[in-house]
Image (tube, rainbow, N blue to C red):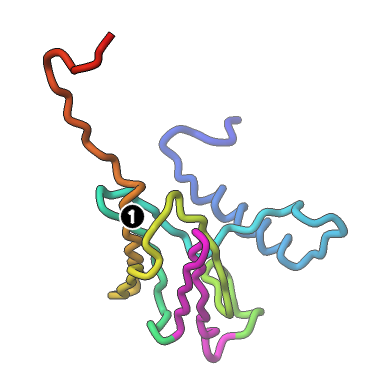
Amino acid sequence: MAIFRWGDSWETFRDLERQVDRLLNGLTFPIPLIRVERQYPPINLYELPEEYLLTSELPGIEPAELDLTVANGILTLRGKRAAPTNAIDDQFRRHERIWGAWERSIAVPERIREDEVRADFQNGILKVHLPKAPETRPRQIQVIAGNVEGEM
């Protein structure tokens, strides 16, 4: 008998993954890094002609609860999400959203103008604009046809 048939839902495997995650969350391991945590918040980093754009989904977080710093090519995001009220651990049948304090640091790919970094937050989406420093932008070099003086 086949365990999985094409066209069937993957939801059974997702439930298994969640149950294993729940089991492993309750264990302490003597050796660190046996279980790799998912990084939070998830981010996307885009390179645009004039800047890098970092976006992150942060539902349930207020702008006042966010702290962003940039120094020496490292962007650090810090925040806190309040725990759900009137819910205890035994009542959860799924627990995928995190709460509490979190921090994530990201190395910026190239030199940026740190003094011009800006961020906006709307509808739970954080956008951080990281303007490129002039030295990192590609410079168009004009090619001139003909002989150049002093050419060998």
How many labels were placed on the picture? 1
Instruction: Give coordinates of residue 146: x percent, y percent.
Output: 12, 14
Q: Residue furthest top?
A: 152
In this rendering, is residue 76 above or below 20? below
Residue found at x 35% / y 68%:
117
Instruction: Give coordinates of residue 2: x percent, y percent.
Output: 58, 31
Span highlighted in magenta in the image: 65-87
Instruction: Give coordinates of residue 58: x percent, y percent.
Output: 41, 71
Frontmost residue, 63 versus 61: 63
Q: Residue furthest front?
A: 150
* 80 magenta-colored: yes
Give neighbour class at mark 1: few <14, some 14-19, many 20+ (Cα, 10 Å): many
In this rendering, is residue 148 above or below 21? above
Residue found at x 45% / y 49%:
109
Frontmost residue, 138 versus 29: 138
The part of the image, by quadrant, that contains residue 112 is: bottom left
Frontmost residue, 118 versus 63: 118
> Mark 1 = which residue?
132
Q: Residue furthest bottom?
A: 86
In this rendering, is residue 130 above or below 115? above
Residue type (three-letter) at the residue carrying disc 1:
Lys
Frontmost residue, 145 versus 32: 145
Residue found at x 29% / y 40%:
138
Please indicate whether residue 71 sits to the left or right of residue 113 in the image. Answer: right
Residue found at x 32% / y 75%:
121
Element carrying mark 1: loop
Q: Residue furthest right?
A: 30
Instruction: Give coordinates of residue 38: x percent, y percent.
Output: 58, 58
